[in-house]
Image (cartoon, grey):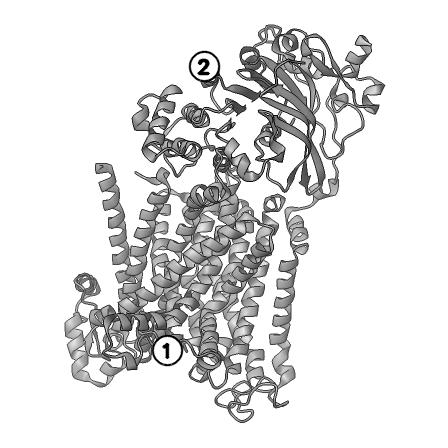
Amino acid sequence: MTEYSPLLSVKGLGVEFRTRRGVARVLDDVGFELHRGQTLGVVGESGCGKSVTALAVMQLISQPPGRITGGEVRFDGRDLLQFSESEMRRVRGNRISMIFQEPMTSLNPAYTVGDQIAEAVRLHEGLSKAASLARAVEMLDAVGIPAAAQRLHEYPHQFSGGMRQRVMIAMALACKPDVLIADEPTTALDVTVQAQIFDLIADMRERTGTAVMLITHDMGAIAEMADRVVVMYAGRIVEAGAVRDILSAPQHPYTRGLIACAPGRRTVAPGQPLEEIPGTVPSLLERDAGCLFANRCAKVMPRCRAELPPVTTQAGGHQVACWLNQETSA
Amino acid sequence: MAVTVPSPTPTVEAMSPWLEAWRVFRSNKAAMLGLVILSVIVLTMSFGPSLYGVAPFDIAGAPFTPPFTEPSVWLGTDYLGRDVLAGVLVGGRATVLVGLAAATVAVTIGVSIGALAGYFGGWVDTALSRVTELFQVLPALLFAMVLVTLFTPSLTVVIFAIGIVAWTGTARLARAEFMRLRHLEYANAARAIGAGPLRLMLREILPNALPPLIVSATLIVGSAILFEAGLSFLGLSDANVMSWGLMIGSNRRNILECWWAVTFPGAAIFLTVLAVSLIGDGLNDAFNPKLHLR
Amino acid sequence: MTRNLWLVLRRLGLAFGLVLAVLAVNFTLIHSAPGDPAMVIAGEMGGADEAAMAAIRKNYGLDKPLPEQFVTYIGRSLHGDLGTSYTYNRPVSELILDRLGPTILLVLTALLGAICIGTLMGVLASRRPDSLFSGVVTVFSLIGYAMPVFWTGILLVILFGKVWPIMPIAGMRDVRMMGAGTWASMLDVLHHLVLPAVTLGLIYVAQYSRLARASMLEVLGSDYIRTARAKGLGVWAVTFKHALRNAMMPLVTIAGLQFGNLISGAVLVETVFSWPGLGTLALDAILGRDYPTLLGVLTFSAILVIVANLLTDVSYRWIDPRLRGR
């Protein structure tokens, strides 16, 4: 597809969770690529496997009950799934960092924010306490926290939600990682703060050249931030491609539904109710043979319930897994 | 267009929470073991003494007879020659009855004080919380020792002495529950149709606060039994009523010569408290099903 | 800073109020017991001696109205005058100060040991909640809770008195060690301390290991633990630096709340091992009907608990920065 090798390339990734009611197949044959300096958007409803994908890349899935059943996560040429735990520790927070959905609870309440940022620096770069704290000040300054040198010694509870997410970003970027995984970084924040955080992530990407994997269900943010988009549904990728292609010409009925549902789209007239995709995500415990979206799809065909649709690739690397697409292009 | 999801087990939803709790409890092996142990102990202490027919204070053989040597005194005799088995069989009556009665007293005091504090809040809460704090700083056993010594050491005094020192935990729990529940919708609804505070507390809030209170009450039974055993071990209970603690206490000076006279009654106390706390844990799990999903 | 000072003063004020309340309880007890309060104060010794009774009545102002007696009683007590023991013929406060050291030594050793060992066991068990070790910790904590403390002590006395005599089973000092050097006699005391401290500590090891396991399991599931792991920290740094500190809160709470129970347990343990502390003093006082001493011990133990609660409060603020300035 591309001539130069991607920074992060995931292929055929599968994850299962053992639950009391059976084994849930949470990720099935997930694959995507992330290139240096790029932003990859991963979208889908909650429970579609976006966060599990991120945790699988970081190797932070608790096993048991989770289990990575197969595939590869190739980072800078090497498969992370083959790494030992201690090798993986040198990657986490150093070369691949992650920020989370809940800034209110993602920082340890017992330590100052300075300690928590400096800890990663000391760990990965072996700096002295003073030097790592100096880096922490630098980082807090860079993410736009005023009076960084004083706030360094404050505790998370003394920061607002948006400020805490800034601290999280400072912590994640303190060791100048190659990849920043942002798992719904603004979901828990006020709308006005959301825009600021997205701007900050975009700005930091410009400045540091870090590639970003942005997990969100906010199509607006995707439109603004991402270069490429992966659309996930029930643990599988249903559509992937350049952000322009996906937004202007979505192929999969699910993607179309997602775009139609996005608030703030021009298609929704004032006073008109927002659209929604009917039904809910199917149980991951017993998967049917066919397309997982079949029971919610408005354009469902008999074939959809019988066989899993294969992936077709169109111009510009636009990939879709849908029978509808198969029929028209065939 | 909405998809109807067929409910997998519709019967579960129709069950009352109590029945559901019992179902969880029954599937808990440790709790059921506790229930079995406790039943055996209660049956033994109820019928054992009359079947065995030896009075616990009577001299039944030579002092210091070791166990498993004389068929007539199977668990041996103590330093006075009293039959250890007879004591073990009957000694649980006082211990368990005092434990149960004292726990009843403690729970009654605790729930009343906690309910008033939690329901009314404000200065009532402040005042009652200070009282609770006062009883928390008085070391329970010492306080009970003082009470038993100042008044005559009869079973009634022991029951109240334990009850008076053991209620603070329940009070804190009841206070928190009543505080949480007093503003819930059904309480407001009942208030709207003119229910008075007493009715609200007893009919609307208390039933909903019961599960944690039952768990706490069970645990108090366990500690009240330990408490009674401690007091009678110190010789501060009714000296005319045989109890496990009294057996251990009276043989204390001779433990190196007759280990059996203290080991068996101690094991009886241990098993009883163990059974009660297994049941308490089982109830706790049964009333908090979310802990099971993990 | 003034705000913090105000908070400290408020805390101390409340603690002082509790001390007054304890004294009021004592006063009530003396006067609600059946019989003549003078008799209660004098105990059996005074009952025989009319002159002593008259002295007590005059000394305690028992002929005066109750409110006045109450004020006098509080005033005396606050000056450290807890009355006179007619059994020992010494001021109660002196008797108590003699016995305070051994009890504090016993209680603190048991408590700190139990917190350290129990927490460690709970932490290790929480690493793998379904492992055999975790199961052993759970069973141990059930057993430890259900064993009557005096029975545990007696079993240890039998074990070490009869089967394997390597530990002293009674007292705090060996008579043969009289006149030995400071170090030798300290070692001797520590040697005597082992069994009582283990006995008393065992219940709390059981409780803290269980509590620590539950608390750690809860903390290990929280978001900031995931953050710490995403940072690249190893299992032990995550467990001991990031999780344990947050998991300590409920442990400290329980340790504070249970300090009273610990003293109650100490009474029984001291009795079993003839440890010369407040517990044996109280028991001797009961046997000798020496009420001033008995009530003095109660008051003093309550003060110990109040002090322990103040310390608990301080450690809360140290562990959880969110509580500072509150």
**Residue A7 in the image, given as x and y percentages of width and height:** 58, 21
- The amino acid marked with disc number 1 is Ala
Q: From mark 1 to mark 2, how far is it between C-alphas?
A: 74 Å
Mark 2 and mark 1 in contact (Cβ < 8 Å)? Answer: no
Q: Residues within 10 Å of mark 2 (few under 14, many from 20)?
A: some
- Of B40 and B262, the residue lying toward us: B262
Residue A82 occupies quadrant: top right
- The amino acid marked with disc number 2 is Asp
Q: Point out the image quarter for the N terminus of chain C.
A: top left
**Residue A277 in the image, given as x and y percentages of width and height:** 68, 18
Label 1 sits on a secondary structure element that is loop
**Residue C233 in the image, given as x and y percentages of width and height:** 48, 38
**Residue C264 in the image, given as x and y percentages of width and height:** 38, 66
Q: Residue at x 46, y 28 (%)?
A: A103
- Of B128 and B20, the residue lying toward us: B20
Badges 1 and 2, same chain = no
Q: Is residue A192 visible?
A: yes
- Of C100 and C109, the residue lying toward us: C109
| Residue B249 position (above or below residue B222) | below
Callout in the foreground (1, 2): 2
**Which residue carries the number 1 mark?**
C170
Q: Residue at x 51, y 82 (%)?
A: B261
**Which residue carries the number 2 mark?**
A203
| Residue B87 position (above or below residue B39) | below
